[in-house]
Amino acid sequence: MTKIGLISDTHDYLDEAVFKHFADCDEIWHAGDFGTDAVSNALQQFKPLRGVYGNIDGQDIRSFFPETLVWECEQVKVVMTHIGGYPPKYNPQSKPLILQHKPQLFISGHSHILKVMYDDTLNCLHMNPGAAGKQGWHKVRTLIRFVIDGKEMKNCEVIELGARQATLI
């Protein structure tokens, strides 16, 4: 059994609450737009980290993380890329990746919209953890925590970190 903490779109802001929420996780997966390597370094020092670079990431992140990552966690094949779309509206680069690799789990970020949805056509679960950072138009910062146990993905929890930014009075 592997406990996963899924995060995306930190945009160079890492809420301290992430460490509390991911304390029991075995791995952290970041779906791009780290912002700077300070975020990736902090996460790597905390737990094993897998990640992909996003459209705002500079060479510091791109030299360490790939655009797309394909791997197996237990008996679940995973494909992760930053800009991916969602069922059935995948972007032009993601659909061929999914058809080629036939993952059971497809992860993307970018939209700042939290989504967990199953694609019956491709037999694939899609996850987008939303955005954990303060940049963007989202109103609530979010994470996902879930478990992979053999072939099963289960115990999915959406975690709200709070408002994107404080309201000034």
Image (cartoon, grey):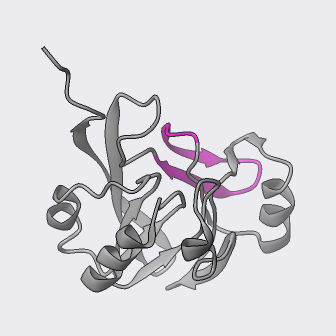
Q: Can residue 131 be seen in this view?
A: yes
Residue 87 image position (x, y, % from top left): 69, 42
The answer to which of 112 and 78 lies nearer the viewer is 112
Instruction: Identify the image quadrant of the C terminus.
Output: top left
Q: Which residue is drawn at 75% across and 55% down?
A: 122
Q: Residue at x 87, y 61 (%)?
A: 96
Residue 27 image position (x, y, % from top left): 36, 79
Q: Quadrant of residue 60?
A: bottom right
The answer to which of 84 and 74 lies nearer the viewer is 84
Give the number of callouts: 0
Relative to residue 42, is residue 15 depicted above or below?
A: above
The reply to whether the magenta stretch includes residue 128 is yes
Q: Residue at x 77, y 48 (%)?
A: 121
Relative to residue 76, is residue 140 depicted above or below?
A: above
Q: Quadrant of residue 42?
A: bottom left
Which secondary structure type mostly characterizes the magenta part of the structure? strand
Instruction: Identify the image quadrant of the N terminus.
Output: bottom left
Residue 33 image position (x, y, % from top left): 52, 57
The reply to whether the magenta stretch includes residue 112 is yes
Q: Can residue 147 be seen in this view?
A: no
Relative to residue 111, is residue 149 depicted above or below?
A: below
Q: Which residue is drawn at 46% across and 70% down?
A: 152
The reply, left or right, for residue 16 in relation to residue 80 is left
Give, as a single range, the part of the protein colored magenta: 111-129
Residue 85 image position (x, y, % from top left): 69, 44
The reply, left or right, for residue 72 in relation to residue 67 is left
